[in-house]
């Protein structure tokens, strides 16, 4: 059951990415530590592939929404596992786990087609004008 619109998902992508970029400051993580770098890498990646997704808030339509959601799920799982994979689970695991599980849930609950999807892919002509 996919209940999240692609437009809402796009807005959340940019906010989520910015929150991850700022998480080391907000959480007072020492700069350059694995926990700080994991959060910042996930945030930068999320913003980058959001900008490259073919949806309402994307800038360059290089990725389909299905590809974007697959990246959300895989990236979220990696972020959630990062405390154990990178060896900082005893110091700080909750933020990474929460952000990662949020990304997985968003990937599973978001619709796979933007509202304008059919219009963007149709050639110009009478059929496209009829759908407006």
Image (cartoon, helix red, strand yellow):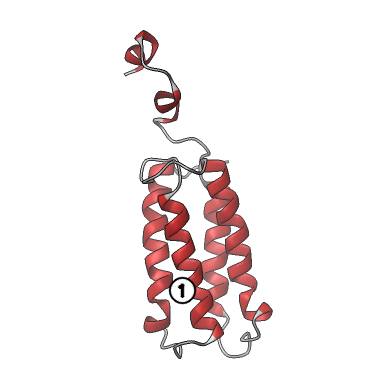
User: Residue 64 placed where, x, y %?
Assistant: 52, 40
Question: Residue 81, located in which quarter of the rendered image?
Answer: bottom right
49 lies left or right of 84: left
Q: Position of residue 119 (x, y in %)?
A: 40, 24
Residue 82 lies, in percent from the top left, at: 62, 75
Location of residue 85 by image quarter:
bottom right
Front-lying residue, 103 or 59 = 59
Q: Is residue 65 above or below residue 42?
A: above
Pointer 1 residue? 40
| Residue at the image position 44 percent from the left and 36 percent from the top | 114
Q: Residue furthest right?
A: 85
- Mark 1: few/some/many CA within 10 Å (<14, 14-19, 20+): many
Q: In the rendered view, does 31 fall on the left or right side of 103?
A: left
Residue under the point 49% across and 74% down: 39
Q: Position of residue 77 (x, y in %)?
A: 63, 64
Tell me, yes or no, if residue 2 can be seen here. Answer: no
Nearest the eye: 96 or 86: 86
């Amino acid at each position: 059951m996919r209940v999240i619109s692609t437009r809402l998902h796009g807005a959340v992508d940019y906010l989520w990415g910015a929150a991850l970029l700022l998480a080391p400051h907000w959480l007072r993580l020492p700069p350059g530590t694995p926990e700080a770098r994991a959060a910042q890498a996930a945030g930068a990646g999320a913003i980058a592939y959001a900008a490259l997704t073919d949806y309402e808030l994307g800038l360059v339509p290089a990725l389909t929404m299905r590809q974007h959601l697959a990246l959300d799920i895989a990236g979220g799982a990696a972020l959630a596992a990062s405390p154990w994979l990178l060896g900082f689970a005893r110091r700080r695991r909750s933020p990474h786990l929460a952000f990662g599980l949020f990304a997985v849930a968003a990937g599973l609950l978001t619709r796979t087609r933007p509202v304008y999807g059919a219009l963007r892919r149709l050639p110009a002509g009478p059929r496209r004008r009829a759908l407006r």
